[in-house]
C-alpha cells in the first residue's frame, strides 16, 4: 500500500473517530486532508462523486427523517408506560 492510500484511509478513520467523540471541527479538518488527497490521486472519481453529491444528500436526508420518525413513535409508545401511572395515595413528588 502506498503512502497516499495510507494517508487517505488514516485521515478518514481519524476524522470519523474525532467526529464521533465530539471533536467535530478537528474531525472535519482531518477528514478534509483525506478528501484533498483523494481528489489529487483520483480526479475523475472525485468529479463523479461531486456530481452525484445531491443524490447522496437526498438519501441521507431520507434516512435521517425515517430515523427521527421512528424515534418519535418509540417515544410516544413509551410515554404510555409505567412512568405515567398515578401514584397511590397522592402526588408523585
Image (cartoon, helix red, strand yellow):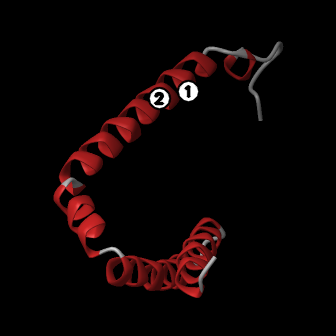
Whole-percent x, y for residue 52 in the image: 21, 53
Give the residue at x 39% y 37%.
Answer: 63
Question: Is 43 displayed left or right of 32 in the figure?
Answer: left
Give the residue at x 74% y 26%.
Answer: 91
- Judging depth in this view, the residue of 2 and 29 nearest the camera is 2
Whole-percent x, y for residue 32 in the image: 42, 81
Residue 17: assigned label: none
Q: Quadrant of the C terminus?
A: top right
Question: Is 82 displayed left or right of 62 in the figure?
Answer: right
Question: Is 16 displayed left or right of 36 in the figure?
Answer: right
Give the residue at x 48% y 77%.
Answer: 31
Q: Is residue 74 above or below residue 46?
A: above
- Judging depth in this view, the residue of 24 and 16 nearest the camera is 16
Give the residue at x 59% y 82%.
Answer: 2
Mark 1 and mark 2 in contact? Answer it, CB < 8 Å: yes
Q: Is residue 78 above or below residue 54?
A: above
Q: Residues within 10 Å of mark 1 (few under 14, many from 20)?
A: few
Whole-percent x, y for residue 23 in the image: 59, 78
Q: Secondary structure at mark 1?
A: helix
- Judging depth in this view, the residue of 81 and 57 nearest the camera is 57
Residue placed under numbered mark 1 in the picture: 75
Residue placed under numbered mark 2 in the picture: 72
Q: Is residue 44 above or below residue 89?
A: below
Amino acid at each position: 500500500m502506498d503512502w497516499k492510500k495510507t494517508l487517505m484511509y488514516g485521515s478518514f478513520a481519524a476524522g470519523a473517530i474525532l467526529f464521533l467523540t465530539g471533536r467535530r471541527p478537528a474531525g472535519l479538518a482531518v477528514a478534509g486532508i483525506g478528501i484533498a488527497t483523494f481528489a489529487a490521486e483520483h480526479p475523475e472519481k472525485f468529479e463523479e462523486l461531486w456530481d452525484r453529491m445531491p443524490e447522496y444528500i437526498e438519501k441521507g436526508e431520507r434516512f435521517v427523517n425515517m430515523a427521527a420518525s421512528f424515534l418519535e413513535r418509540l417515544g410516544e409508545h413509551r410515554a404510555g408506560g409505567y412512568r405515567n401511572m398515578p401514584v397511590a395515595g397522592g402526588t408523585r413528588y
